[in-house]
Each structure stands twice: as structure tokens, then as C-alpha cells.
């Protein structure tokens, strides 16, 4: 099942790529595939929301590529082989990798690397690490979130982990509240530009999604 889903996912990624990213997607992705199979898909449950060879602009102005990125979670995942990233690395390459990690951090992404040995020998431990990371998304210690009522915080947290637009029925299930109460929560989030409507009309909205402001609020520390 994973093999077929991965092939379909890779084809979609290639279809939407161009330039150097397209070239990167044509290289050996054995390590990236291992990362997806052993950790990301078992934890996230879906390929939705993930991007392979995610392109970023480093602080020096050069393009850098992450093995896998979840833009909504603002997290970059990497599979690092000891041979290529440590044993045979040059001093210049070592410095480049450190600068690359700093660029990822300054651009507002969490850098979350795994070694090939960990993926092969300790997959459950690796999964547990990711569960812990996800659990900290939107943690109440984030200064911005403290300004929101608890129900609004929970809608943002559940919404960002869903990886796709959500409906009022979803909000009702998350909060265990009646639809009218959920409408008030959604209305407040929209008024603060933390979520936005998709489809429907000015009077009746069918679906909602987290805005860029909402994403930034969840990841503010």
C-alpha cells in the first residue's frame, strides 16, 4: 500500500515542479522514502500537506532544498546518512550544512533531522519524537495564543493538523459544542483574520482554512 501511495505522491510532486527542484526530484530518494515510510506517514497518516525537495532561499541568496517539508507545520524533515553527512564530508561542506540549518531556522521553520541509522533501528523512537513536536504546536506558552479564548486556540490547533479545509461540523466535533456556539467561535476567528472562508456566500460559508496569520500565531514562541 505504501509503495503505491508513494509512487502516486511522487508523480504529483514531479508534475508541479520545475527547474532545479525537478532535477532534485529525479535523484535517488531512498533516504527520503525511508523517512516517509518509517516516521512521517505512520504519524501524520497522510501525504497531504507534505512537499518533497521543498525550495527555500538561504541567507546567502542561494537556493536550498529540504528532503520533506510540511509548510503548515512550519517543519523541515531531513534524512541524514552518516556516510554522506559526516564520514566523508569536507570542511567546506560541513560549514555549508551548518549555515543551511541556520537559514532554515531564520526563515521560521523547525529543522527536524533523522539519521539513517535511527530510521532503520529505532523507528518507534523517531515516531515518538514527531508526536512530541506536534503536541507542542500551538502550546499555550506561545505568547500570541494566550490572547485567544481556549476554544479558538483549539480550533486553530485542530485545523492546522487536519491539512485540509474544515467545516462547522468538524469544529463542533473538536469542541463538543452545539453548532450555534461553534459559529460564534468561527466568527471571532474570521474577524481576527486567523481563518478564512472557502466557497459559499457572505451569509453561508461551506468550509474554512487557517490563514497565514493563524499559522504564524500558532508557531510564535
Image: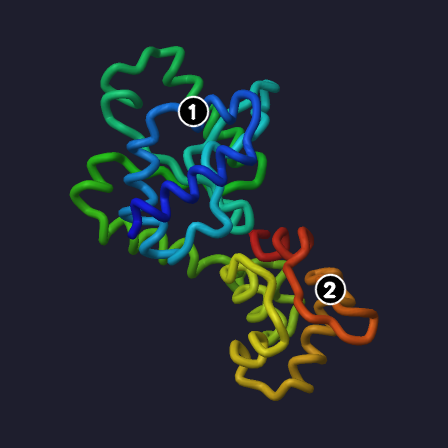
Q: Quick check: 157 left or right of 111?
A: right
| Most foreground residue, 101 or 171 | 171
Residue shown at the point (41%, 55%) measured from the top left: 46
**Residue 85 drawn above or below residue 127:** above
| Most foreground residue, 27 or 210 | 27
Disc assigned to residue 98: 1
Q: Residue 59: which quarter of the image?
A: top right
Which residue sits furthest right? 202
For the residues labelled 2 and 1, say whether their Cβ atoms are less than 8 Å apart: no
Sequence order check, earlier mark of 2 and 1: 1
Quickly name the residue at label 2: 199
Residue shown at the point (30%, 15%) measured from the top left: 89
Q: Could you say whether the residue bearing mark 1 is in a helix, strand or loop?
A: helix
- Residue 112 x/y as whole percent: 40, 41
Disc assigned to residue 204: none
Mark pair 2, 1: CA separation: 44 Å
Q: Residues within 10 Å of mark 2 (few under 14, many from 20)?
A: few
Residue shown at the point (49%, 40%) measured from the top left: 12
- Residue 205 x/y as whole percent: 73, 71
> Count the marks: how many?
2
| Most foreground residue, 153 or 203 | 203
Q: Nearer the viewer, mark 2 or mark 1?
A: 2
**Residue 32 drawn above or below residue 47:** above
Q: Quick check: 220 left or right of 136?
A: right
Q: Could you say whether the residue bearing mark 2 is in a helix, strand or loop?
A: loop
Q: Residues within 10 Å of mark 1 (few under 14, many from 20)?
A: few
Q: Quick check: 79 left or right of 155?
A: left
Residue shown at the point (43%, 50%) measured from the top left: 47
Q: How is the image coloured?
A: rainbow
- Residue 214 x/y as whole percent: 65, 57
Q: Quick check: 36 left or right of 134?
A: left
**Residue 220 drawn above or below residue 188:** above
Amino acid at each position: 500500500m505504501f509503495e503505491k501511495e508513494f509512487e502516486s505522491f511522487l508523480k504529483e510532486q514531479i508534475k508541479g515542479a520545475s527547474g532545479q527542484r525537478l532535477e532534485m526530484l529525479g535523484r535517488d530518494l531512498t533516504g527520503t522514502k525511508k523517512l516517509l515510510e518509517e516516521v512521517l506517514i505512520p504519524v501524520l497518516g497522510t501525504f497531504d500537506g507534505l512537499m518533497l525537495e521543498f525550495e527555500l532561499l538561504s541567507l546567502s541568496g542561494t537556493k536550498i532544498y529540504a528532503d520533506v517539508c510540511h509548510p503548515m507545520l512550519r517543519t523541515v524533515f531531513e534524512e541524514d546518512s552518516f556516510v554522506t553527512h559526516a564520514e566523508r564530508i569536507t570542511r567546506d561542506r560541513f560549514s555549508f550544512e551548518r549555515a543551511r540549518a541556520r537559514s532554515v531556522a531564520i526563515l521560521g521553520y523547525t529543522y527536524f533531522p533523522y539519521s539513517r541509522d535511527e530510521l532503520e533501528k529505532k523507528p518507534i523512537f523517531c515516531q515518538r519524537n514527531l508526536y512530541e513536536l506536534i503536541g507542542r504546536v500551538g502550546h499555550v506558552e506561545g505568547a500570541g495564543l494566550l490572547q485567544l479564548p481556549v476554544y479558538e486556540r483549539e480550533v486553530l490547533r485542530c485545523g492546522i493538523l487536519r491539512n485540509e479545509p474544515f467545516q462547522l461540523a468538524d469544529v463542533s466535533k473538536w469542541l463538543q459544542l452545539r453548532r450555534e456556539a461553534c459559529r460564534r467561535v468561527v466568527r471571532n476567528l474570521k474577524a481576527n483574520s486567523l481563518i478564512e472562508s472557502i466557497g459559499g456566500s457572505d451569509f453561508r460559508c461551506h468550509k474554512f482554512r487557517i490563514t497565514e496569520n493563524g499559522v504564524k500565531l500558532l508557531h510564535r514562541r
